[in-house]
Amino acid sequence: MTKVIQKEDKKLYQCEACGFQYTDDSTSLITGKEWAEKCEAWCKEHKSCNTEITAHAVPQDSEPEKSELNAVQSKTSEASADPLAGRTSNRVKPEDVKFLARSISSKPALSRIEGMTRFFYGLVGIASSLAFFLILYWALRLDSTITNIIANTYSTPLYFWPYVTLTLGAIVLFGVNVSLLVYRWRKFGPPRFKTEAGGGAGTLFGIAASACPVCGSTLLSVIGIAGGLAAFPLGGLELKALSFGFMVLPIWLIRKDLSAKASVSAGASAQAGESGICPLPRDHRFKESDRPWLLALLALVIVLSLISWNWLKTEPIIAKALAQNRILDSSYNANISAKGDKLINEVVAQVLPEKGFQSKIALGDSVLKLVQNGVIDRDKFLAIYEDRGGLPDALKNVLDSPSTKPILLTRENANYYINLMWPLGLANYMSSNKKSPISGKSLFHFASTGGWNLGKEENGGAYFNKFKIAKLTPEQEALVTKIAQSTYRPCCNNSTFFQDCNHGSALLGLLQLGASQGLTEDELYREALAFNSFWFPQNYVQTALYFKATKGTDWNEIDPKMVMGKDFSSASGWYTNIDAEVKRLGLVPQQEGGAGCGV
């Protein structure tokens, strides 16, 4: 039964469960009495308030306010007198009383409190956004990189820029969500999950939907939602937009909840708090007792920032930018520039012999089998070379008959062998490929799979690990897998085993072909380095310059296994250890361009 209160010329109807008061409103079809009855019915059934109902409550004039210091001291004395008060979080600590006493003595002090309060909640938001970024980036690094996303999507601005905007927006909104949640928790206590969990659910779904639709590295894949990304008309951008929406929703819900609670009068709040239905508002501002939390948040932001930077600087695109910005040592340049041209000519002749590199590996019938199984479509393959003068004489019959002659790799034919080895590495069966990073829901979204369009199928992912082209014994397969996992390429940070681009697939195909023909581990490393050198000439000429100038070691004396490792052949390793140092020495001028990952 609602209580009727006559106040001046207004008749107020009060919910006896929570104390909210309602009056008739000419703009509403529902009377004040009906709102009060709805409120009381909800409160008694759910043991909580409904913000949709309480939003129609009438704000009441609060009692004359005491000074802040008296109010704090009053709360402290009440908490001391009532042994049960310690069970509530409304109790004020003695150090907070002293802190507030000093603070309210002057306006600058009050401004300082407000500033510290904003700083405190700002740190909560920044730490949360950084943590969320690390989660997304960790998931992305499982099967791709930021560099790959830029390379694959930058040419499509209607996809690239919405993707970047929605991703950054979701990261920022996540921090705002957590900051608002902490504010609400400190002021009114934890939300009641039966009636106030919408904000948290929206945030959680927003996290899950913040996928990378390009590579499929998404938290949704854990529960199987990402399996159909390829079927989305916008290539998965729909999930990004959905994530953004679910990040905005909790902010709106929490702000609405806070606004409803803020409209309650002091008397109604006290009555509701005593009944255990609606929480009493507490002092949410920064206090002396919050200082340890502030320091912890500062430390957390610093740690998360350092982790983020250590991860980001391994990105090829960032590592390259950092290397280009290194300051050259001009005093050393003057001493070495005179012999620079001679040194460059010497190492070029070693890395890229004019007569080519005589490989021990022959194509055999591998290309013929690729054509027979549809991995290579003969017409499509020949069509891409029509405008380039066709295939060279040594490869005229490569699609129609076996080739038992070992490969002679030259500067002129190196790129042809990329397109011949690429489908081999992609399609040739190895049991260890079941554990390949590209084997999964994102299979069709890599440059190595989606980029191979010279087969009968539209996407090369259809051929992955499907045919026994170069048959391997268990021992040979183990050797190939071992070498593939420890060799890299300068276009990205992934190993050969992680064949996410054409160069990775091509080198894996070369290793499989060589192992099937009986080459030893040392021979395979030597072959891998030679082919990589012709596929990435600028990178490995500079690598040879580095070893010659700093170590006095000729190219043919360098351990191929060491050079093909992460420190010298991955993108970040090469830019950090080779490119930056060679430019510092002034050995080579800045050059543009490099090997691409297309047919």
Image (spheres, rainbow, N blue to C red):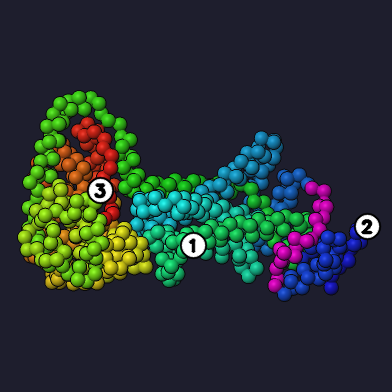
Residue designated by label 1: 239
Q: Is residue 512 left or right of residue 180?
A: left
The nearer-to-camera label among 2 and 1 is 1
Residue 331 included in the magenta stretch of the image: no
Which residue occupies the foreground of this view, 1 or 506?
Answer: 506
Q: Residue at x 6, y 60 (%)?
A: 405
Residue type pointed to by label 3? Ala
Sequence-first tag of 1 and 3: 1
What amino acid is found at the position of numbered circle 1 in the picture?
Answer: Leu
Identify the image quadrant of residue 576. top left
Report the residue that reaches farthest toward the bottom.
45
Q: Start and end of the magenta stretch?
A: 46-65
Q: Which residue is mark 2?
A: 9
Q: Judge whether residue 543 can be spotted in this image.
A: no
- Is 580 placed left or right of 534 in the picture? right
Corner quadrant of residue 384: bottom left
Q: Secondary structure of the magenta portion, mostly?
A: loop
- Residue lying at the far right in this picture: please name it: 9
Which tag, 2 or 1, sits closer to the chain's start?
2
